[in-house]
Structure formats: C-alpha cells, structure tokens
Amino acid sequence: MTTGRLLLFLTGLLMMLGLTGPARADDISAAGRGVVRIVTIATAEGEVVGFGHGSGFAVAPNRVLTNAHVVEAAERYPGNVMIGIVPSEGDKSYQGRLIAIDSDRDLALVEFGGIRLPPLTFYNGPVSEGDAMIALGYPGNVDLATARSAMDFITPLSPIRSQGVFSGRRNLQGVNVLLHTAGIARGNSGGPLLDPCGRVLGVNAAVTRSEEGDASFGFAVGNDEVAAFLRAAGQQMPVNGVACTSIADRLAQDRSEAERAKAADEAKAREDAARNAADRETALDKALIANFTMRENFIAGAGLLLVLGVAGLGAAGFLHTQGKRRETIWAAGGGGVLVLAAFVLFFVRPAFDPAAITGAARVAVPPPVVQTGSARWSARLIPPARASPCRARRTSTSTSTQTAASTAAPNMPKPASRTGSASWCLTRSRPFRCSNMHRRRAPIPRRATCSPPARWPMRAGCAPA
C-alpha cells in the first residue's frame, strides 16, 4: 500500500473507534480533557497530497480554538482539505469545520459535532515573572518517537504536559505574546498554556530555534488577543480572575482548617474543664468551711456541757458539806450527766479526713499544648503533708518539685510531659483558723496563678510550534 493510499485510508478512520485512558484527578489533567489533536488531510484528484497536525482546546462544548497556521490549508483549499478533531478521551474522532480565522493573530475557530467537550476557562488576572506555567498539546517529536503506525495519529490519547515559568511579555509583529520556558515543539501549535489551576493564559504558537546550545523559549498568544478574536467571531469566552488555588493547596487549606477546628475544640474542652475544676474547688471550700463550723459547734457545745457538769459536781460537793443529802444526789447526778454528755458530744463530732478532702479536689484539667521552646507553664500541686495547722507555708519551685509532690501524694495524677523547657510551680496553702483544741487543719486548695510567661510571518530565530 502506497503512502498516499494509506493517508487516504486514514481519512475514513477518523470516525472509527479508539482507546482512551481515565483522567487523573488534578487541575491540569481536568483541563486536559478539553484538549484535542487537530489533523488536516489534503487530497487532489483522489490522492492524498498532504497531512499535518497540531493542537487545540475547547472554548465551547462544540468548538475548539487553535492556531491559524494549523488549519490554513483548509481556508485556502476548502474543497480539498478536511479537518479532523481527535479528542483526548472518548471512543471516536470527528470532522470539523472552520468558522473563523485571523492570520494576523494566528488564531482560528473550528466547529464540530457528535461530542461535547468541557470548555477551558481563561485567566484574566495578573501574571508575574517566574510564575509556573504548563503547556498541553501533542508535540510531533513525541509522536515520531512513539507512533508505530499512522493509526496512532488518530487514536485518542491524553495530551503531553510540560512545565516552565513565565519569562515576560513581548510584542511580535503587533501581537501581544507571552514568553515562557515550558517545553513545546512542532505539534504544540494551538495548545493551551495553563496556570497551575488549569486556566488558560495563552495559546502556544511558536518556539525559538535552539542552535549551538541556545536556550529554547516558547511564544503564546496572550488572552487579550484571544478575547478580541473570540469577540469578533461571536464566541463567548469563559473568564476567571480569582488568584490560583490548586487542588493540592485546597486540600492543605482543608487540613489546616480541620487542625484549627480541632485545636479550638481542645481549647474549649480545656476551658470547660478548668471552669468545672474551679466550680468544684469553690464547692469544696464551702464544704470544708461548713465542716469546720459544724465541728467547732460540737466542740463548743461539749465545752459548755463540761463546764456546766463541773459546776454541778462542785455544787454537789458544797451541798454535801451542808448535809443536804437529797440535793447533793441531784446535783452530783446532774453534773455527772452533763460531763458524760460533753464527752459524748465531743467524740461524736463530724469526722474530718484531710486525705479524703484533698482526693476529692483532684480534677484532671488538660493543660494547653506546649510548643517547643515555649514559655513556662504551671500546675497546681498541693501535697496535704505540707499543710501547716496555723500558718501558711511557702514552697519553692525547683526541678525536683514533681518528685516531691509524687512522694507526698502518691495518688495525685502526674502532669503530662511536655516538649521544650517547661517547669512547674506550686501555689501557697491557705490554712484554716485553728480552734481552741489546736488540732491540725488541712489547707484549702487554691488555683495556680502561674501563666505562660500563574500565522505569524517567519522571522529569524523563530519558528511555528
């Protein structure tokens, strides 16, 4: 089969089935679903006399934008040149029709039917030098290296991506262009130049010739030129000017928001626990005061009964000297009963267990999360054994405070270990007023106050992509 007959056979294959791969879940791959290969096949007297291809992308479900030099032959010889649209995915190829062309801006609009493609969005915001840019398309050098037959040129395949940076704006023959370093080649013509969010920044059209090790730069028609062309063609242009936030960035933001929400929930839980602890301490303080008041009342009552009983016994003795036997018996009996009642009242007074009271006051309050190298933090540790019966005793802060507290109060929960240089402080104990019985009093626990101290004429050095 001659080459001409093979190319003619390809014309009939444009409507045949092809293979496709699934789109990857990122912004650039999502945009790649709207990128197509554009094939032109020229025939004369029943023979194929020319074959070419370039790239393009959807600006509407049934329209693609490309370079004018890619479909120029279809404009010159409309009866002899056919345009084929090969999508990046799907199961068919489709015939296109040229509806608008601007050779000065090197832009063309092709319409097709049989499939609806996702249109790409254009970015009309500011672009700074050094911003990342991604080129999508079908470079011919890749096709020459990988194609095993002419069938590969009409088989739906995902576009090739290459990445570079924005190198500035230039004016080429009166057309505003973007200069960039994303790798493009012949076959990329008409493909989109994207930002990291998959929005169109320009239409790749040409590349500098790299000779003797010269750096290669690409030229893309700017969106201002594209907007003017589409407006003249009566085609709407989907535009977005919001600063780029890629899928990866959005996922990172979602993670940060989740972490902030978690931190806020933890802080609220700590505040609630601290408030509950404070309320409990206040209730315990009141219970302690009521306990001491009750005990002192019992002791005072016992003392009064004791005094009255002794007085009664004294009166019995006096009456005995007077020979008043009956009165002596009554006075002695009453005094003895009063003395016995005093002892009974004293021994049945409400019991006081300092260890039980202190154990009830231990409320676990999670301390704030300490960052590395943060300021000092404090915890309330009040060993009952340090309490003084009648005066306040100050305990000094040292590196062995936690060990001493654990020894004095073995049941008390230890503070959680923290990263960085954190220390712990103790609060002072406030004693109760001692009664006349001089019994030892437990301290009232106090709360710590330590605080965390983005067709041109051929010119020398420039070639169409």
Image: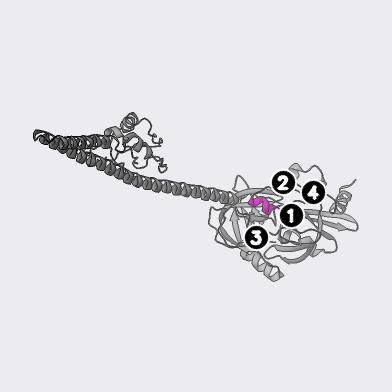
Q: 330 or 176, which lies in front?
A: 330
Position of the C terminus, as image quadrant, is bottom right
Q: Is residue 35 magenta?
A: yes
Tag 2 secondary structure: helix
Q: Is residue 170 visible?
A: yes
Q: Earlier in the sequence, mark 2 or mark 4?
A: 2
Q: Are marks 2 and 4 in contact (CB under 8 Å)?
A: no
Q: Residue at x 69, y 71 (%)?
A: 232
Instruction: Report x, y in % for residue 88.
Output: 74, 51
For label 3, the residue is: 121
Query: In the rendered structure, which amino acid carries the disc numbered 4?
Result: Thr
For label 1, the residue is: 36
**Rendering quarter of residue 456:** bottom right
Query: In the rendered structure, which amino acid carries the disc numbered 3?
Result: Thr
Q: For the residues carrying marks 3 and 2, which lies nearer the camera in this image? A: 3
- Give the distance between the C-alpha atoms of the residues marked 1 and 2, in whole angstroms: 17 Å
The correct choice, above or below, for 398 with respect to 47 in the image is above
Q: 225 or 301, which lies in front?
A: 301
- Give the distance between the C-alpha atoms of the residues marked 3 and 2, in whole angstroms: 28 Å
> Which numbered marker is on residue 200?
none
* Badge 3 density bin: few <14, some 14–19, many ≥20, Cα 10 Å: many
Q: 399 or 342, which lies in front?
A: 342
Q: Are marks 3 and 1 in contact (CB under 8 Å)?
A: no
